[in-house]
């Protein structure tokens, strides 16, 4: 039995009967999923299939039209702050202030975590390869560097659940290697991840489960 | 408030003040607007001393309300666009505390300059000197209430593409009580009457807004990011 699993060995993140509607169109319905410790759920599907919407539902930014998401057995709404302390979301929007430097951005992100950061923001910048860019404004960084800065949040805010929306977009080959390293380390430590990606993630296959959204017409 | 919440509150206030400083040109627009609106009255109505002195309380307060409205739409908009708003809502800290931090920073940047400029402009409109302390006290109580109420409106319209157009129409009716008590206090003081009652009412409005608005705005933001 893997350590840290919820009582009775139930997966920590579960969803049942999820349905989402956008613009009068049903994206998916009756969707169920379960992610246990050390597992990565790869959400696949064509553009417009609702991958981002599903991710936003799973991290509690959006209410599904039907069904519920449970974290450690509790519906998200009731898990509340305990859930939000357990999730880090890196979405399409980078979550960066263009007028703040890389370091300032990361310091705010760490403060919003509400706890002492796992590692110092400066050290996190080194880890994602932005050590020399600490005092450059985020607006002056390249798209790939901004992506890396967004991913540095994963390091300063320790959380068991990572929700990553296209983490490989705009990053170069070294950046993809960095994402793979981060994910492998996270899963090896018993973490969970829900990820969308069009490129291979570089994570051992036995850890990956695939959920395919077909994009109901 | 836990240590974490206090730390995040401070970090957000500092962040927004730093951002305002780095874009200081933009943040001066409401103040410039305030000055110009009040300057229109001597030009448009009458430059006569007696007329202006009668108009001064209302003119300064209307100017302050309109200037507050002008900057309100920007409160959450850039945060929504760059994704920092969803990060804020995903923070384990209570969202109303974070909203309050944003409103405080917003007031320090746009409201406080209005409080400081108010007496200068009122003096230029020949407001009797004995009414000046009441004007300052009223603006000190009233402008934070305007920012707080404005945050509720801004939280609801930030998700709309043309929210900036809708917001003034939504907020102006809600600003009426602050305007009437604020201008009423100054008019009373100018006429040599006691103004304490008006100021108490403004204080009550501020207390009510400070307790309810952060929760309402946090709920509005959750709807807007969904």
Image (spheres, rainbow, N blue to C red):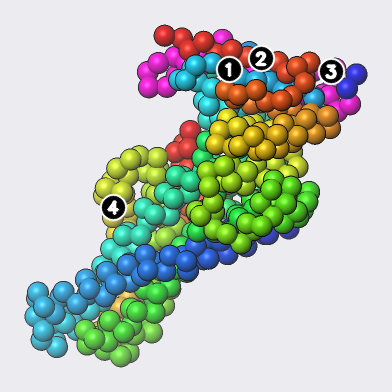
Q: What residue do we see at 59% from left, 37% from top?
A: A171
The residue tagged 4 is B168
State whether discs 1 and 4 lie on one chain.
no
- Give how far across and how far down residue B138 sits, in percent: 38, 74
Say which chain tag 3 marks: A
As drawn, the label of residue A9 is 3
Q: Is residue A120 visible?
A: yes
Residue A26 colored in magenta in the image:
yes
Residue B166 colored in magenta in the image:
no
The residue tagged 1 is A44
The CA span between labels 1 and 4 is 43 Å
- Give how far across and how far down residue B117 sits, in percent: 35, 79
The residue tagged 2 is A210
The CA span between labels 3 and 4 is 54 Å
Above or below, A102 against B124 in this view is above
* Helix, strand or loop at mark 1: strand
- Which label sits in the foreground, 4 or 2? 2
- Which label sits in the foreground, 3 or 4? 3
Q: Is residue B142 visible?
A: no
- Dot 4 surroundings within 10 Å: few (below 14), some, or many (20 or more)? many
Residue furthest to the bottom in view is B129
Q: Which residues are magenta?
A: A3-30
Say which chain tag 4 marks: B
């Amino acid at each position: 039995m893997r350590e840290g699993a919820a009582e009775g060995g139930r997966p920590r993140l579960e969803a049942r009967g999820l349905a989402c509607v956008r613009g009068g169109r049903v994206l998916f319905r009756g969707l169920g999923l379960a992610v246990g410790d050390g597992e990565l759920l790869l959400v696949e599907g064509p553009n417009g299939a609702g991958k981002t919407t599903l991710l936003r539902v799973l991290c509690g930014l959006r209410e599904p039209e039907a069904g519920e998401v449970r974290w450690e057995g509790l519906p998200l709404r009731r898990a509340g702050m305990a859930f939000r302390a357990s999730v880090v979301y890196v979405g399409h929007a980078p979550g960066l202030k263009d007028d703040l430097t890389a370091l300032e951005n990361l310091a705010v992100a760490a403060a919003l975590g509400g706890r002492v950061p796992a590692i110092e923001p400066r050290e996190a910048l080194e880890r994602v390869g932005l050590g020399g860019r600490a005092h450059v404004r985020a607006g002056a960084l390249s798209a790939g560097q901004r992506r890396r800065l967004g991913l540095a949040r994963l390091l300063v805010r320790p959380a068991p659940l990572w929700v990553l929306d296209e983490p490989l977009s705009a990053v170069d080959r070294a950046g993809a290697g960095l994402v793979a390293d981060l994910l492998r380390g996270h899963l090896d430590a018993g973490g969970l991840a829900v990820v969308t990606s069009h490129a291979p993630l570089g994570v051992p296959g036995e850890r990956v489960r695939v959920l395919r959204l077909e994009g109901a017409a | 408030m836990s240590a974490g919440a206090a730390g995040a509150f401070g970090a957000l206030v500092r962040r927004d003040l730093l951002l305002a400083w780095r874009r200081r040109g933009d943040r001066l627009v409401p103040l410039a607007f305030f000055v110009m609106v009040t300057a229109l009255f001597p030009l448009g109505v009458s430059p006569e001393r007696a007329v202006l002195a009668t108009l001064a309380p209302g003119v300064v307060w209307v100017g302050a309300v309109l200037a507050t409205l002008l900057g309100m739409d920007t409160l959450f908009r850039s945060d929504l666009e760059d994704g920092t708003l969803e990060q804020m809502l995903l923070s384990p800290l209570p969202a109303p505390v974070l909203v309050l931090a944003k409103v405080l920073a917003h007031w320090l940047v746009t409201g406080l300059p209005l409080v400081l400029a108010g007496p200068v402009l009122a003096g230029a409109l020949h407001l009797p000197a004995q009414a000046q302390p009441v004007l300052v006290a009223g603006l000190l109580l009233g402008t934070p209430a305007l920012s707080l109420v404005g945050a509720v409106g801004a939280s609801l319209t930030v998700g709309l593409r043309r929210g900036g157009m809708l917001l003034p129409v939504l907020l102006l009716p809600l600003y009426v009580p602050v305007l009437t008590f604020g201008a009423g206090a100054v008019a009373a003081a100018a006429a040599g009457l006691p103004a304490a009652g008006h100021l108490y009412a403004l204080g009550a409005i501020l207390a009510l807004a400070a307790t309810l608005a952060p929760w309402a705005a946090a709920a509005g933001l959750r709807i807007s990011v969904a």
